[in-house]
Image (spheres, grey):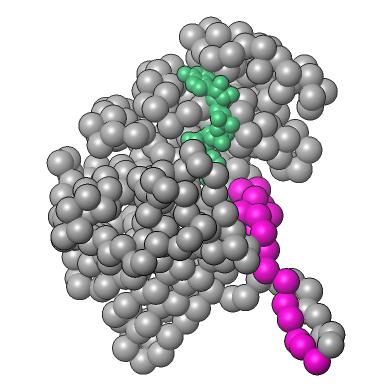
Amino acid sequence: MTIRFGVIGTGAIGREHMRRITQKLLGGEIAAVTDIDLSAARKAVEELGIEARIYPEEELLADRSIDAVIITSWGPAHEASVLAAIAAGKYVFVEKPLATTIEGCERIVQAEEKIGRRMVQVGYMRRYDRGYQALKSVVACGELGSPLMVRCTHRNAAVDERYTTEMAVLDTLVHELDVTRWLVGDDYAEVQAVFPRRTKYAHEALQDPQIFLLRTQTGIVITAEVFVNCRYGYDIQCEIVCEEGTVSLPAEASVEFKHDALHKRAVPQDWKLRFADAYDAELQDFINQVERCNEPQGPSAWDGYLATLAAEACVRAQKSQGWESVTPGISQPKFIAGRV
Ligand code: NAI
């Protein structure tokens, strides 16, 4: 059976996901497309050369031939689309964030809870990256003992003037917030932000770099550096320090140079390339589960909620420069219990 997708939001990543499903992945087709700007939707369909229907979101969600939706609109629009899609009985793949407010995430978790099964997967694709999966299996097998500390680094070569201090959390750190919690299988209790000396390459209103300390409920301490004007490239690192050893993300496969008495290795420049396989794998898994009428297995609405909750605490910590607690206002739905 081919899963018929409706896409809501045909911007950069929406078009990427449409291309993936049409040209790379198995078992899905883009059957309907919408955008707040319908001419953008039309352009995306024409560029890809597919025969998808283009109509407003309401009609797309009412179309019974659509099995699942991909929500790739702007973050503030996610909540309304996710809730409407759940109400229409569609499976949902929503790009991060699940919703931009804690209350919005809670409403989505509760809507799914009413149905009593998972319908939603959130696009925290790092859980599908082979390096992170290898880290997770080493930690889970217990050979290194319990994790004590995690050191994460998230560096981008440069950002433009539209990038704000808060975006270092909401757009950048949020990936570490999701994947680290998943890696160590523990929830956050409190967070703190520390601001080092600013790089001369940061625009006037931007604090860059930033360091975040996160303490989990069992006491694991995570240090996460966000440095978005590091100049040299896109650099993602993660090391987990356990009682009997350490484990780190593998170095990226990239060409090595030996030239002029130097030995050099190329640094990736682009997050899209670094995580291309993970984006493919997350959507293929979503298609496979929907095809079998299973619940989606990737990051859940509950995971999306906890990522937004931790991000909101980090934003508070940016302002207070003190420890801020991460306290869920609702309980974990029973059908998600035990799955971090
Ligand atoms: P974009 O600005 O390129 O595209 C957003 C599109 O949504 C635009 O075409 C806009 O017209 C449309 N839109 C806005 N409000 C809408 C509404 N109410 N209904 C229908 N369409 C609407 O943004 P981009 O970069 O494609 O990001 C989209 C989402 O994907 C964001 O939430 C972003 O955080 C997330 N994202 C996730 C990434 C990841 O690594 N997982 C990477 C890049 C983006």
Which quadrant of the structure image shows residue 40? top right
Question: In this rendering, is residue 211 above or below 114?
Answer: below
Split into 4 quadrants, where in the image is the C terminus? Answer: bottom left
The reply, left or right, for residue 119 in relation to residue 259 is left
Q: What residue lies at 49% left-to-right and 9% top-to-bottom?
A: 58
The reply, left or right, for residue 124 in relation to residue 26 is left
Question: In this rendering, is residue 15 above or below 177?
Answer: above
- Assess whether residue 271 is covered by the magenta stretch: yes
Looking at the picture, tell me which residue is in the foreground, 52 or 201. 201
Question: In this rendering, is residue 251 above or below 282?
Answer: below
Residue 323 in percent (x, y) is at 16, 60
Looking at the picture, tell me which residue is in the foreground, 339 or 153. 153
Q: What residue lies at 54% left-to-right and 14% top-to-bottom?
A: 36
- Assess whether residue 181 is covered by the magenta stretch: no
The reply, left or right, for residue 19 in relation to residue 186 is right
Magenta-colored span = 261-281
Q: What residue lies at 47% left-to-right and 54% top-to-bottom?
A: 202
The reply, left or right, for residue 169 in relation to residue 199 is left
